[in-house]
Structure formats: structure tokens, C-alpha cells
Amino acid sequence: MSTQNIYKKINYLRLTKTPVLALIVILISASICIFSVYKIKKYNTSLVNLKSIHYQRDLIINNYKNTLENFNKSYKDKFDKLQQIRPSEEGIINFIEKLEEVGKNRNLTIQLSQDAVDSTDLKNVKYNLGLSGDFNEAVKFLSDIEYQLPYLIGFEQFNFVDDDNEQNIKILISLSIK
């Protein structure tokens, strides 16, 4: 009902001198206008809620995708680290170079060998590590490799031999990716 139609009805009722009917028509048209405004606001609120729901859905999907991508990246990094310590020539050379680099800082001589029995294990690779030098420096070396190399290092056997001129330490270590 348009505003012009309402005014026409009001003028018609004035001419017929029925103020009660005019008041009723005014109240009805006002309530229709208020109800229409309420419906429009409710519709707009519904649109806002719908947009919010779509935004939340997109946010959840993006978080899931990011989590999946991060998981794949971390898995790939772990796989790459595992390939570095696998019993391939490059992996062993890379690991020995890292050990020697840390050992040189501690004035230690390092001998490294690998058990043939455990060479096929994908999760753990075991090495025999021999250190020659000062015992205190060897202990510091073990703490250094634990924090500086990207592997979890388990010390399985520890043998200490004290000769007259030097101390030798034989350790069986197992490596796994962090």
C-alpha cells in the first residue's frame, strides 16, 4: 500500500466525517509500515548472518588446508632428513661431516661406523661412534650434537677406555628424525 493511497483514504474519510475510521486506517497503515521495516531489518540481519556463516566456513576450510599443507611440508622435511641419515653414501657423508665439524670445535677425533644389521631400518639408523680426546670435551661434544644436529640421538651403549696418553669413548648411537 503506497503512501498516496493512504492519504486518499484519509481524505475520503475526512470528507465523510468519520474520524474513528480515519484513526483506524492510520493505525493499520502505520502497523503495516512498521511490520515492513521490521521484515526488511530481519532480512538484512539474515543476510549478515549468512555472510558470517560463509566467512566462518571459508575460515575453517582455509585453516584445514593450511594445516594439511603444513603437515605435508613437515612430513616432507622429516622424509628429507630421514633420507640424509639413511645408509646411502650421501647421507653418511653428510652426517660424518656434521659430526666432524662439531668434533673439531671440541678437539676430538671421531671414528664412525654403521652396523650392517640395522641398515634397513627406516625409523632408526644405528652408528658406532668412537671419540678420542678429553672426556670432558667428549661429554660437551655429545651435548652439542644433540642440540646442533636435526636428529634425535639415542645413546644405547657407552664404553670409556682411559689410556695413558688419551681417553677413548665408544658409543652406540641411534638416530631418528626430529
Image: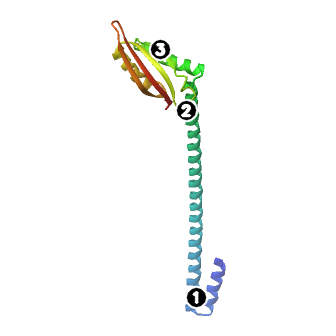
Instruction: State if disc 3 and disc 1 touch (CB < 8 Å).
Output: no
Tag in front: 1 or 2: 2
Question: Can you give x and y, in whole percent of width and height, for residue 106 in the image?
Answer: 40, 14
Tag in front: 1 or 3: 3
Q: Which residue is mark 1?
A: 22
- In terms of image quadrants, where is residue 53? bottom right
Q: Nearer the viewer, residue 18 or 26?
A: 26
Q: Nearer the viewer, residue 103 or 66?
A: 103
Q: Residue at x 59, y 34 (%)?
A: 76
Q: Seen in the image, is 178 located left or right of residue 10?
A: left
Q: Which residue is mark 2?
A: 78
Q: Which residue is mark 3?
A: 111
- Spatial CA distance of label 1 from label 2 is 83 Å
Kind of residue sitting beneath label 1: Ala
| Image quarter of the N terminus | bottom right
Q: Nearer the viewer, residue 46 or 136?
A: 136
